[in-house]
């Protein structure tokens, strides 16, 4: 039962002065809200703030081990005894036609000098090019039935990264950071580590954010001991002075910042990130803190694995610190310095595999022992494979009709082979999977719905998978 006597703290106000005094806290709250709103206008929410996925996610980040130029499926993960038997003969008519760039019509089939063995409990066959990766096969889902739409490097590289054969669309790294943001506010969300030998035919556009806002562009690391320059604070400048300078720059920049000024907003965020990287990144990028056993695992300090081993180890350290997407490129510059083996498949692939086999296996083992492989999806592959026919007698041409990629970690069911090419490796014939299906599988593992991860561009809601992709159900 309620008492008719009023509560002691609820007596009525008797004078105007008393009313103003009693209402002071309320007015103060209104003033504080106004100030906070104004501050929010000057410091808009970071575009890369973490966002929840559409669906339950198995993976939180992706490492793409990009073998630029097109590694041969026939020399790596897709043994073809019949190809060896028919070596030196014309391709039998029952296998159909194929369009190439350089292979002539009278070209003969080329067998492989590589030997294949079964490894692990799964018994997956791997060639002697990759003895280290072979020890990890039970973690790999080997997709032998990949295909794309172009036999030209630049167009195929655009399709691999962006889902389109022409430049201008966002890369998968940009799409993932657009969908999920970053788990780190002191490191880039999306990092590309190019090969020191130079740029590739598709150039920077294949990694770029395309029509997405500039906040989702990649950060390009340099090769060598200093992947990021100018991480040290200027000599004679204290941390407090540096903070005051950056605060002034931000206040000046945001004074008249419009809601749709994405480019300028990205520049402001870049200033902030640069400062935070000066305080955090040196520790992440300094590999001297790693024990010798770990350096040896990746082949760091030894040739020819030192460079790719350093970059794979750095990828692991970046994943540990919340970077969302990392691309570690093998191959750069002219064709001979990539996996583009037109002249001599043996010389080329032996050299490229020696550079990457131990670092890739080291990365998988290191992620696994640290408990990171479960949340990190690792993708290995190139923009296409190599032709069953010989080019110039000992080489192989570009080949987009059937080739191999593999995935590991991030909820992927390892220890299995999915799909198949025909008996000579010409085309994908069993459960063929397009690049867009690979993209859809990556999105699925990170909890992103391809139909919801869209961006309006030229009157259409665009997405990574272009029209429609199909997740590779066997491996998820």
Image (cartoon, grey):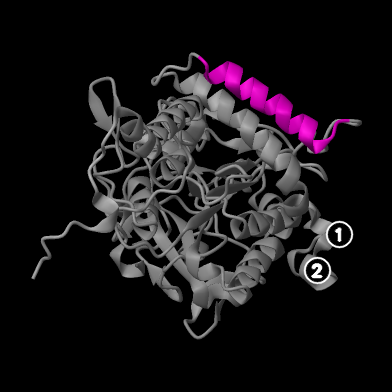
* Residue at 57% in and 18% down: 253
**In the figure, residue 36 lies in which quadrant?**
top left
* Residue at 82% in and 69% down: 291
| Residue 372 image point, x, y percent | 56, 68
Dot 2 surroundings within 10 Å: few (below 14), some, or many (20 or more)? Answer: some
Range drawn in magenta: 237-255
| Residue 261 image point, x, y percent | 44, 18
| Residue 88 image point, x, y percent | 53, 54
Q: Is residue 69 visible?
A: no
Q: Nearest the camera: 116 or 407?
A: 407
| Helix, strand or loop under label 2 | helix
The Cα atoms of the two marked residues, 2 and 1, are separated by 8 Å
Q: Are marks 2 and 1 in contact (CB under 8 Å)?
A: yes
Q: Is residue 363 above or below residue 334?
A: below
Q: Nearest the camera: 80 or 232?
A: 232
Q: Is residue 192 above or below residue 81?
A: above
Q: Earlier in the sequence, mark 2 or mark 1?
A: 2
* Residue at 63% in and 33% down: 272
Task: Specify the quadrant that holds the N terminus.
Answer: bottom left
Residue hosting label 1: 301
Q: Nearest the camera: 125 or 469?
A: 469
- Would residue 377 be found to the left or right of residue 259 on screen? right
Residue furthest to the bottom in view is 121
Q: Does the magenta segment cover residue 250?
A: yes
- Would residue 382 be found to the left or right of residue 170 on screen? right
Q: Main secondary structure of the magenta part?
A: helix
- Would residue 194 be found to the left or right of residue 391 on screen? right
Label disc, if present, on residue 296 of the rendered structure: 2
Residue furthest to the top in view is 256
| Helix, strand or loop under label 1 | loop
């Amino acid at each position: 039962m309620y008492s008719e006597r009023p509560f002691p703290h609820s007596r009525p106000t008797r004078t105007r002065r008393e009313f103003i005094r009693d209402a002071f806290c309320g007015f103060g709250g209104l003033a504080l809200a106004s100030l906070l709103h104004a501050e929010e206008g000057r410091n808009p929410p970071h575009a890369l703030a973490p966002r929840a996925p559409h669906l339950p996610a198995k993976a939180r980040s992706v490492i793409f081990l990009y073998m630029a130029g097109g590694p041969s499926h026939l020399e790596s993960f897709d043994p073809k005894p019949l190809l060896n038997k028919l070596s030196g003969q014309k391709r039998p008519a029952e296998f159909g036609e194929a369009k190439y760039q350089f292979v002539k019509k009278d070209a003969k089939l080329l067998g492989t000098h590589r030997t294949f063995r079964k490894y692990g409990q799964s018994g997956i066959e791997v060639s002697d090019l990759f003895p280290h990766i072979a020890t990890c096969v039970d973690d790999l889902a080997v997709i032998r039935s990949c295909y794309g739409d172009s036999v030209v490097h630049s167009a195929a590289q655009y399709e691999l990264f962006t889902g389109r054969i022409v430049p201008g669309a966002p890369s998968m790294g940009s799409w993932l950071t657009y969908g999920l943001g970053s788990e780190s506010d002191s490191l880039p969300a999306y990092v590309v580590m190019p090969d020191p030998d130079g740029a590739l035919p598709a150039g920077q556009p294949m990694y770029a954010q395309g029509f997405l806002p500039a906040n989702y562009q990649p950060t390009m690391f340099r090769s060598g001991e200093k992947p990021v320059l100018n991480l040290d604070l200027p000599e004679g400048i204290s941390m407090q002075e540096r903070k005051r300078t950056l605060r002034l720059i931000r206040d000046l920049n945001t004074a008249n910042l419009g809601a749709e000024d994405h480019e300028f907003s990205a520049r402001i965020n870049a200033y902030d990130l640069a400062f935070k990287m000066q305080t955090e990144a040196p520790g992440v990028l300094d590999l001297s803190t790693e024990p010798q056993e770990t350096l040896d695992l990746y082949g760091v300090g030894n040739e020819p694995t030192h460079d790719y081993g350093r970059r794979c180890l750095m990828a692991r350290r970046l994943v540990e610190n919340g970077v969302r997407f990392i691309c570690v490129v093998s191959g750069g510059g002219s064709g001979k310095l990539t996996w583009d083996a037109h002249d001599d498949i043996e010389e080329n692939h032996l050299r490229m595999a020696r550079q990457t086999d131990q670092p890739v296996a080291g990365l998988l083992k290191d992620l696994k022992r640290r408990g990171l492989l479960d949340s990190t999806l690792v993708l290995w592959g190139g923009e296409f494979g190599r032709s069953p026919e010989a080019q110039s007698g000992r080489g192989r041409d570009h080949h987009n009709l059937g080739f191999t990629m593999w995935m590991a970690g991030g909820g992927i069911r390892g220890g299995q082979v999915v799909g198949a090419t025909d008996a000579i490796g010409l085309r994908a014939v069993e459960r063929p999977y397009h690049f867009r299906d690979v993209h859809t599988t990556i999105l699925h593992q990170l909890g992103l719905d391809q139909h919801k991860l869209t961006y309006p561009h030229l009157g259409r809601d665009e997405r990574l998978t272009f029209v429609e992709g199909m997740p590779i159900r066997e491996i998820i």
